[in-house]
């Protein structure tokens, strides 16, 4: 048996110190562990937060994408929305009935000076080479809410009042490729169509090119897409269906009426567009000068926008034909080299160049701009260092243009291309002789209207 040893006091002290140290070490380690655990927890928390944030972001992105794709779909749907005739549809398959209806149409439209009807025809598609079926249906849309379907294949011929309506030169028939349709009527029935073609129809494809300033082969679908952003039903089964069979199905009636209705709407839109384009330029103008030009019966209008501040003045020179159609608008497109401030006077030489005095808007200072067939050909004729103040000009029998600079008392003589030939001081005692020499006296002044 062992006997417990008694340690000396110093050793006991040593041991207890050692024990304390060891305990401290343990405590320290524990502290570190706790700290580490704390840090881990924070890290974990942070990671969780990051993850949540990421997924929230992702979700937000997806939702946005979803929303965007919904909007896109909606736009696409709107773009391809189908246009349909929704008004009163009058279907006629008897001669007497058709005569009465056509008389009514003529009576109703005779008061209007610019009466027009949407026109279309349908016939069964023949699959035999060289054979073409007779026109079966004539559709006439007289108003956006009224469309007549004349089933002429059931009548055997074109009733007299329908003929009269077609030939009425005060009622314009409008449609795409309408001329070839009208010629087909002459091949199919007893009717002479040359007067319709000459006097009472308008091809809306041709009209569209004229008004939109393009050169396309338009289909009805193309026009509807371009002008209304809509589509029309061109189901081939319906289109190539039997149009001579009595009675037409409701689907056929709606399809046929829509074609004439859409022709009506397209024509209406084009004509309104034409007049609003003109109004946009003419209305609100500060001042307009009109020059009636002998060459090619042109009308030239110079005008400036109605701005209070002189710096914002923007001028245009519009060349129109005698019907008011714009052949050219100079100065409208600022990206091109031509811009006007205040077109003040306009004249034209026999070579069809247009001369414009463009006032700067600030003072009497200005310039002369010469417009050629294509574009600007000359500007700012200046004789000396002094500013140029053209106030009036006129053409001469020799096709020169004499510009009067009232500020500096000079006459500038230009050739028809706008190049300066000479200038004469109005204070010059020899002025008369000089003018005679240049064949400038007795020139007939062309009229310039304010
Ligand atoms: Zn059609």
Image: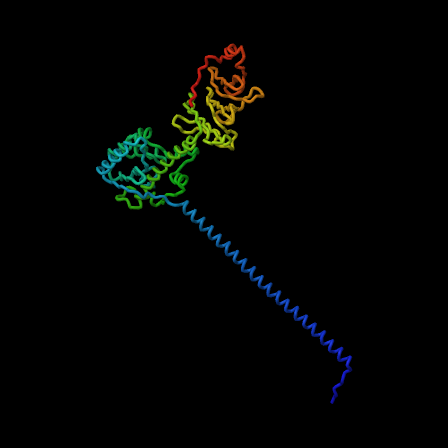
Q: Quadrant of the N terminus?
A: bottom right
Q: Is residue 101 visible?
A: yes
Q: Quadrant of residue 25?
A: bottom right
Q: Quadrant of residue 248?
A: top left
**Rendered residue at 46%/23% (across/down):** 346
Q: How is the image coloured?
A: rainbow
Q: Quadrant of the C terminus?
A: top left
Who is closer to the viewer here, 450 or 181?
450
Q: Is residue 318 above or below residue 243?
A: above
Q: Is residue 283 left or right of residue 42?
A: left
Q: Is residue 7 above or below residue 261?
A: below
Q: Is residue 206 visible?
A: no
**Rendered residue at 69%/74% (across/down):** 23
Who is closer to the viewer here, 117 or 237?
117
Q: Is residue 272 above or below residue 17?
A: above
Who is closer to the viewer here, 119 or 60?
60
Q: Is residue 108 left or right of residue 77?
A: left
């Amino acid at each position: 048996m062992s006997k417990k040893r008694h340690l000396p006091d110093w050793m006991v002290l040593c041991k207890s110190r050692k024990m304390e140290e060891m305990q401290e070490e343990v405590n320290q380690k524990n502290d570190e562990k706790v700290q580490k655990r704390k840090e881990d927890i924070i890290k974990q928390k942070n990671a969780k937060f990051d993850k949540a944030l990421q997924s929230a972001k992702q979700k937000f992105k997806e939702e946005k994408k979803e929303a965007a794709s919904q909007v896109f779909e909606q736009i696409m749907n709107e773009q391809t929305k189908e246009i349909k005739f929704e008004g009163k549809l009058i279907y006629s398959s008897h001669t007497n009935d058709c005569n009465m209806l056509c008389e009514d149409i003529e009576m109703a439209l005779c008061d209007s000076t610019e009466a027009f009807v949407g026109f279309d025809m349908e016939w069964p598609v023949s699959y035999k080479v060289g054979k073409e079926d007779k026109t079966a249906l004539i559709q006439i849309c007289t108003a956006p809410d009224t469309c007549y379907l004349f089933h002429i294949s059931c009548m055997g011929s074109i009733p007299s009042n329908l003929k009269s309506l077609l030939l009425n030169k005060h009622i314009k028939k409008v449609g795409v490729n309408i001329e070839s349709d009208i010629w087909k009527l002459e091949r199919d029935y007893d009717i002479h169509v040359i007067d319709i073609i000459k006097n009472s129809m308008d091809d809306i494809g041709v009209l569209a090119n004229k008004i939109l300033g393009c050169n396309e082969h338009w289909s009805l679908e193309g026009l509807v897409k371009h002008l209304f952003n809509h589509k029309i039903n061109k189901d081939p089964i319906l289109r190539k269906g039997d149009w001579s069979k009595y009675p037409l199905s409701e689907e056929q009636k709606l399809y046929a009426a829509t074609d004439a209705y859409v022709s009506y709407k397209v024509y209406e839109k084009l004509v309104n567009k034409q007049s609003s384009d003109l109004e946009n330029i003419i209305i609100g103008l500060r001042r307009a000068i009109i020059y009636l030009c002998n060459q090619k019966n042109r009308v030239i209008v110079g005008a400036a926008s109605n701005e209070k501040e002189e710096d914002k003045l923007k001028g245009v020179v519009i060349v129109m034909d005698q019907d008011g159609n714009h052949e050219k608008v100079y100065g409208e497109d600022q990206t091109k080299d031509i811009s006007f401030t205040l077109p003040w006077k306009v004249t034209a030489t026999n070579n069809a160049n247009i001369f414009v005095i463009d006032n700067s808007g600030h003072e009497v200072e200005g310039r002369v701009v010469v417009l050629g067939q294509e574009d600007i050909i000359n500007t700012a004729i200046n004789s000396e260092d002094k500013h140029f103040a053209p106030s009036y000009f006129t053409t001469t029998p020799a096709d020169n243009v004499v510009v009067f600079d009232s500020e500096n008392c000079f006459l500038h003589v230009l050739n028809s291309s706008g190049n300066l030939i000479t200038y004469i001081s109005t204070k010059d005692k020899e002025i008369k002789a000089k003018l005679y020499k240049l064949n400038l006296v007795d020139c007939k002044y062309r009229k310039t209207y304010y």
